[in-house]
Amino acid sequence: KDQDGNNGNSSAEVYGPVAVSPFFPGNTFEVWTSPLEDDAADDENDSTSTYRNCNTTTDGIAVVLGAGNQSFLTLIDVLDNCLRHRRPVLVKHHPLREWLAKPYRIMLEPLSKRGYFAQVSNISNDATRALLSDPGLGHVHITGAYKTAQAVQEILAQTRPHLSANNIKSMVTSELGCATPHILDDGVYTDMELKNACRIIAFGKK
């Protein structure tokens, strides 16, 4: 298909449409991929070419420690790292979302067959430590608790003593529960309004 969805001389593989989430009914997405330079290349050569094109020497591989609350968050993190930051991604699903491996394998086939995406079947803590300790790791993205982010940084620091604390922090991005900022604009508030705001903040931090 061409970009208008019609058959033409310039071909592309189209995957989808796939439903985004049960929470967003009627919303779908498609993945369009251009043919590789050598269509006759096998999957192994495809993967090698992809890794060569990635800036793996500088950035390394990104490990995404998947979300346990929403199924679509890990997908967004994969696409962000692959398509925006040009990093190959290795996903370790949350124990509550282990079943996502099968639909992700289908939806992200265009990336996996080019060597940009893979999933870890072992969801144990030992597997996490092994991933974080690997010298090929360049970035970690976490969706979870603040304590989890601290534990990740501790492992990175222990296995990379030559890096400074700032270097370690720069390797990690996160979306953390109980770490959402609350902003009160300048203004005049009643005692009841302030009490309600405090209650909401305290509830959100639990």
Image: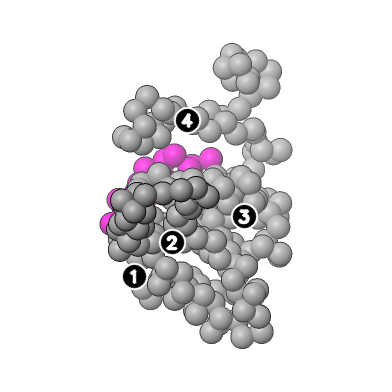
What element does badge 4 sit on? strand
Give the alpha-carbon distance from disc 4 to disc 2, as whole Å.
Answer: 30 Å
Looking at the image, which is closer to me, 78 or 186? 186
Q: Which mark is residue 29?
A: 4
Q: Quadrant of the N terminus?
A: top right
**Residue holding disc 3:** 87
First in sequence: mark 1 vs mark 4: 4
Give the alpha-carbon distance from disc 4 to disc 3, as whole Å.
Answer: 21 Å
**Residue holding disc 1:** 124
Left or right side of 167 for 186: left
The x and y percentages for residue 126 are 38, 76
Left or right side of 129 for 23: left
The x and y percentages for residue 177 are 39, 59
Looking at the image, which is closer to me, 95 or 183? 183
Residue 143 versus residue 112 in the image, above or below: below
First in sequence: mark 1 vs mark 2: 1
Looking at the image, which is closer to me, 63 or 113? 63
First in sequence: mark 3 vs mark 2: 3
Q: Are marks 1 and 2 in contact (CB under 8 Å)?
A: no
Q: Residue at x 58, y 51 (%)?
A: 81
